Image: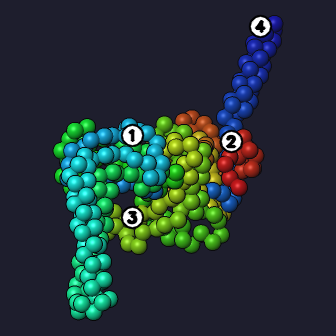
Amino acid sequence: MNRIFIVLMLCGILCQSCETKKVEKEEETEFLVSTPLVKDTLITKEYVSQIRAVSHIEVRALERGYLQKIFVDEGQTIHKGQLMFQIKPAMYQAELRKAQAEAEFAQIEYRNTKNLADHKIVAANELAMAKAKLDKARAEVSMAQVHLGFTQIRAPFNGIMDHFQVRLGSLLDEGDLLTTLSDNSEMWVYFNVPEAEYLDYKSNQSGHNMSRVRLQMANNKLFPHAGVVKTIEADFNNETGNIAFRATFPNPDGLLRHGETGNVLMDIPISNALLIPQKATFEVLDKKYVYVVDKSGKLKSREITVAAELPHIYVVKDGLNQSDQILLEGLRLVKENEKIHYKYLKPATVMSQLDLYAE
């Protein structure tokens, strides 16, 4: 009798233990699900860019001769009108003195002829010829002065010197490259935009200030000043399907230089965007999927198309609607068609636990 009682007690204890483990197992397998959050938001498009100075010119020799002096240095900031190079002017000074002497002779000849013409000794035609000769001599003086002036090469605007292409004493021909000069007070940043995004830009431009852009420099830091899209080229590139935009950035500290690269960041508004946490997705062969919970509580994998990526969040283009319940976590613990016990969380609650960048 005692043995029967003991056996019954052991069975009761075992059953109670099994029920406890069953309850614990059910608690452990309760999953969290939610629905996509529909909200107006901003996405950031990134475009590879080329940075150019607003003025970037080649400085070339205007006359032939030896490079006599260099008054500036590579990388130096220079001002408009500052003397940069001097070509040996001896020959052009001689030409100027010759032209001045001929002009003085023509001036004397003109005065003598005019004196004779006033006394009716010579005809008026001779006076006119003397005047024409004087004008020609004066023109030659002006021409010689211009050529002499070309031996001094001055900065046409404020800018930064590039490296020298010649050295002191070099024999220069007319048109030889001396250096380049960049005005970096403002920078033009060029980037290519696909046709579809160009159309979105033009259609949304009136409703949102999309003309303002940011610049991510090569060191992945943001340039401290915002830029403005001021110019769009007239034609699309038929090979790439892109069109070139040009944004103007102020450069008061001279941080940007001609020839740099970077990425232009443009914020684009999306109305009624469908947002889900990135952690609710998984990949198979480079395609993204989520687990959708049907009415019977079973899981069905569904492929989605991502329109844009935000920190911790995907903007879904296709594959989901606002009422679909998706599995939030434990994706590796479940399988297709498995029935689960779950708890529903409101999408706003889910997103509040993420770093949400939306408006």
Q: Position of residue 219 (x, y in %)?
A: 48, 37
**Horizontal relation, residue 70 to residue 49: left or right:** left
Of residue 88 and residue 276, the one placed in the foreground of this image is 88
Disc 4 element? helix
How far apart are the two marked residues, 1 and 2, measured between alpha carbons?
56 Å
Q: Amino acid at mark 3?
A: Asn
Q: Residue at x 58, y 63 (%)?
A: 211
212 over 254 or under it: above or below: below
* The N terminus sits in image quarter: top right
Disc 1 and disc 3 in contact, CB within 8 angstroms: no
Which is closer to the viewer, label 1 or label 2?
Answer: 1
Q: Nearer the viewer, residue 264 or 291?
A: 264
**SS at mark 1 in the image:** loop
Is 359 or 314 nearer to us in this picture? Answer: 359
Of the residues shown, which amino acid type is indicated by label 1?
Answer: Val
Q: Which residue is mark 4?
A: 3
Residue behind mark 3: 242
Instruction: For marks 4 and 3, give the CA distance.
Output: 89 Å
**CA distance for labels 1 and 3:** 42 Å
- Quadrant where the C terminus sits is bottom right
- Quote the CA–CA distance across marks 1 and 4: 111 Å
Image coordinates of residue 106 in percent, x first then y, are: 25, 73
Residue type for callout 2: Leu
Q: In this orientation, does residue 255 appear?
A: yes
Does residue 262 appear to the left or right of 276 in the view shown?
left
The residue type indicated by label 4 comes to Arg
Q: x%, y% of residue 291?
A: 57, 48
